[in-house]
Image (cartoon, grey):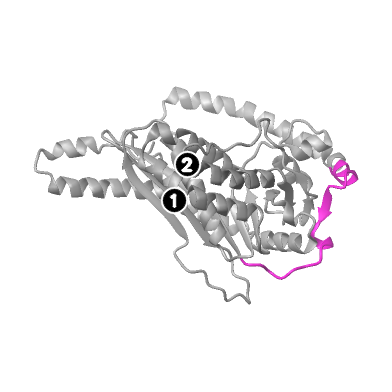
Amino acid sequence: MDKPSENYPFEELPEALVDEMLNQCDSIGDDLYTNFNQIKEHRIEFRDKLDKKGLLKRAADIPPSEIPTTCGIDGSYVVEKLLAVDIVATAAVAFEGLTPPSEKREWERPHHLVHIKNIQHYDKISSIAGAVMASMELQLAEKSPHNVVFMDGSLTTPFISLNQGLNKVEEAKNEFGEYLINELEKTLNAYKNILNPSTDQIFVGVPKYTSKREIGEELNIEGYDDKALLTLILNSGEYTKHIQLKQPDQPWHLNLNPHPKEEKLESLMEDIIAELEKIHIIYYRPNLWTPALRLEIPHSIINNKERMSILLKAIEYQSAKGIIEPYPLYIADRMVKHLTGGLQAIRQSTTQNIARKYEGDVSDIFMSMHSYRTKGG
């Protein structure tokens, strides 16, 4: 059965369940209304606190820069669980932003990396696939020739993903784990160069969602995450002064034991950790149709007005109505979301090819290649 249509979103749900959902909508609306009213009532007070702390800044106060070139990096992974095996796909895509009028630079294609394999069932394959995806994103970002490179999510997320994947490699013993190990040195070098680039490039993490509250804690404001709070109190063209990223409760660590060159990679890991500890964040609202964007930036640009101007100009130029993140990230995100449909098509094509060659009962093939996932699930 197909997914419910946009016109009839409840068509597959029991009537009693729909009634219960609708009955609970009023209380949700009341809670949100109260929340919005509280921020509205305290908006001037919150802005005053931000200003008195020296955290309220205006892009217009920084010397203007030329429009920089940009690109967005995003990745995805899909695990197609079949009766006989799992088919796993990871991909990362780089999409170039709106081109400045005077720009003639070309980036050699293709701007993507992809890895697809079938493996034996392993219930923690998502950890390894997520690490491979992070590896691909880092390598693509490092290769980008653009002035500003937007990376989907936090700059710390790749480190966490890599560690989770490396913790499962020895247990899994599959080709995805081997791929992660084989690419690890190249990946860590790319990560180090992103966090502390030797060029004037700016690599910036742009999380869609975060529960971090560095600004709220600095202002002693409870009950709101920073993105929601600053969207409602920042005016167009305003941003917050840089503040250090809140560090985790446990020290940063990367499990390098599975790698044959563990000792060689230790110094790389230490360099990366040193840079992670110096990451700063700002929130910037380029216009009224865009929410305040959380930007995680390496320490090398926080006190450089010229580079900060380039970053803010990149955000401003790549903002469009109806899109709540920089344009190249939005397009890259839309691209990688189609990986699931693409993998399902590959599975169907593969099944047909096997069936044509198989000399036994073809029902064996179709049964073994049947997905555990229900259609539309």
Image point (72%, 59%), residue name:
312
Instruction: Count neighbours of disc 1 (C-alpha within 10 A) and say few if under 14, some if 14 to 19, many if 20 or more.
Output: many
Give x and y (percent) for residue 5: 41, 42
Instruction: Count neighbours of disc 2 (C-alpha within 10 A) and say few if under 14, some if 14 to 19, many if 20 or more.
Output: some
Give x and y (percent) for residue 16: 45, 22
Secondary structure beneath label 2: loop
Q: Is residue 26 visible?
A: yes
- Check if residue 59 falls in the magenta segment: yes
Q: Looking at the image, is mark 1 or mark 2 nearer the viewer? A: 2
Measured Cα–Cα span from mark 1 to mark 2 = 23 Å
- Check if residue 173 falls in the magenta segment: no
Image point (48%, 47%), residue name:
133
Q: Are marks 1 and 2 in contact (CB under 8 Å)?
A: no
- The quadrant in which residue 33 appears is top right
Give x and y (percent) for residue 40: 79, 39
The numbered mark, 1 or 2, whose residue comes first in the sequence reads 1
User: Seen in the image, is 129 located left or right of residue 344?
Assistant: right
Q: Which amino acid does label 1 sit on?
A: Ala
Q: Which mark is residue 259?
A: 2
Towards the viewer: 152 or 114? 114
User: Seen in the image, is 282 located left or right of residue 180?
Assistant: right
Residue of label 1 = 91
Secondary structure beneath label 1: strand
User: Seen in the image, is 245 located left or right of residue 16?
Assistant: right
> Magenta part of the protein: which range?
47-69
Q: In this view, does 147 lie above or below 136?
A: below
Image point (81%, 66%), residue name:
63
Q: What residue type is labelled 2?
A: His
User: Seen in the image, is 281 located left or right of residue 173?
Assistant: right
Give x and y (percent) for residue 347: 28, 46
Q: Is residue 235 visible?
A: no
